[in-house]
Amino acid sequence: MATINYLTRIEFDNGVSAKATEIIQSLKLSRILLVTDPGLYRSEVYRRFADRLGPLVQGVFHDTPQNPDEAAVEQAAQRYLEARCDGIVALGGGSSIDLAKGAAIRATHDGPLQSYAAIHGGVARITSQVAPVVAVPTTAGTGSEVGRATLITLRTGEKLGLISPYLIPRVAICDPELTLSLPPGLTAATGMDALTHCLETFVSPLVNPPAEAIAIDGLARAARWIKTAVSDGGNIEARWQMMMAALQGGLTFQKGLGAVHAMSHPLGALAGVKLHHGTLNAVILPVVYDYNLDATPQWKQDSIRRALGLDGNASVSDWIRQLNRDLNLPASLSEMGVTRAMVKGLVQGALQDHSNASNPKPLAEQDYHALFTSLIDG
């Protein structure tokens, strides 16, 4: 078992989730709210994990929506308070972990959730009183298990980032064996989420060489193993490598993301359309990469090609598009149900998103309009 201390404590190994009780108790926690999603709640993975925790679990919230919203956060926070819990364990993908972080704020902080959004000056309002969170990812993509942010769709319809070092889970329990039953489509979508995190943070102009070193290694790892994980879900080596790539993506996006996420966040908040975050990133990534190309230093372009195993001046965006095809992911937003009528609101959401500021090349309203439109028209 590897114990890694980088931003937070990370327990990473095949089968390490079997030690969850011991790990949680080492944090002096004794009354846990277990947060998960409806599908996982009905699974053998959930049953085994909950049985291991036994009486530590004093409450369960299993209604996490695909894109966590304010109403679900408040319900989870209320359950936390009613059960007099002293910590939250999130079992699941990025949605469950994000919801747990939102509930950790809501249960311990007064005022509307909107006031804690980064774009409203909320970073300084989130204090050390945040309920402690332990993250147990069951997908390999989000990186939220080591991230300082949570994305919540508010009642206003905005999907906003709440960001604070206090939101980083106290421990991330990363067990690749928990991803063995993940179906191919979800393996592909979450894997592309990890790949996108590594690539987008690497090209971000903010200065953070340690994060860039992690990002380029994670990118090479994801590029090498994603197809194997999708085609051979029982391959534990591929699952281990993809969970590590996802973890690396989460570690490196402390540096800052860019226009891919500025666009995918408002898309994820669309009413009446359920859009998976990782799939959105996969579709958007090649278009944004090309947009940023003339603002991306040559040495970074060369490093990316080496990580992907490409020669000379081979097109990175074409490689991504081909990978999406190989993984049976959509080629356009229109395939996912996004229409031109939605573009105006999406553009405004992207401009206001916290990830917009760290894109390599500035984007104005007309730039986002052109990008969204090109992805809808195909």
Image (cartoon, rainbow, N blue to C red):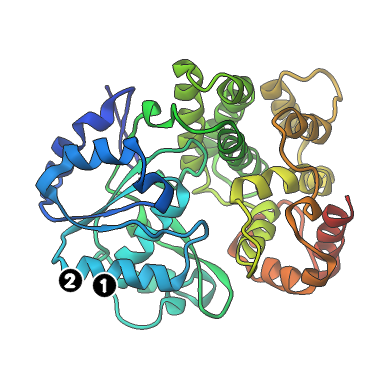
Q: Is residue 105 above or below residue 328?
A: below
Provide the secondary structure element on which disc 2 rests: helix
Determine which of the numbered discs, if any, sits on residue 328 in the image: none
Residue at 66%, 59% in the rendered image:
262
Residue 259's spot in the image, x, y percent? Answer: 70, 55
Q: In the image, is 241 to the left or to the right of 358?
A: left
Q: Amino acid at mark 1?
A: Gln
Image quadrant in which you'd find residue 306? top right
Q: Amino acid at mark 2?
A: Glu
Q: Residue furthest bottom?
A: 111
Determine which of the numbered discs, if any, sits on residue 78 in the image: 1
Would you name the residue on which mark 2 appears?
82
Q: In the image, is 96 to the left or to the right of 249?
A: left
Q: In the image, is 145 to the left or to the right of 20?
A: right
Residue 148's spot in the image, x, y percent? Answer: 42, 54
Residue 229's spot in the image, x, y percent? Answer: 56, 23
Residue at 22%, 30% in the rendered image:
18
Disc 2 packing (10 Å; few <14; some 14–19; many ≥20) = few
Q: Nearer the viewer, residue 316 or 182?
A: 182
Mark yes or no: residue 305 visible. yes
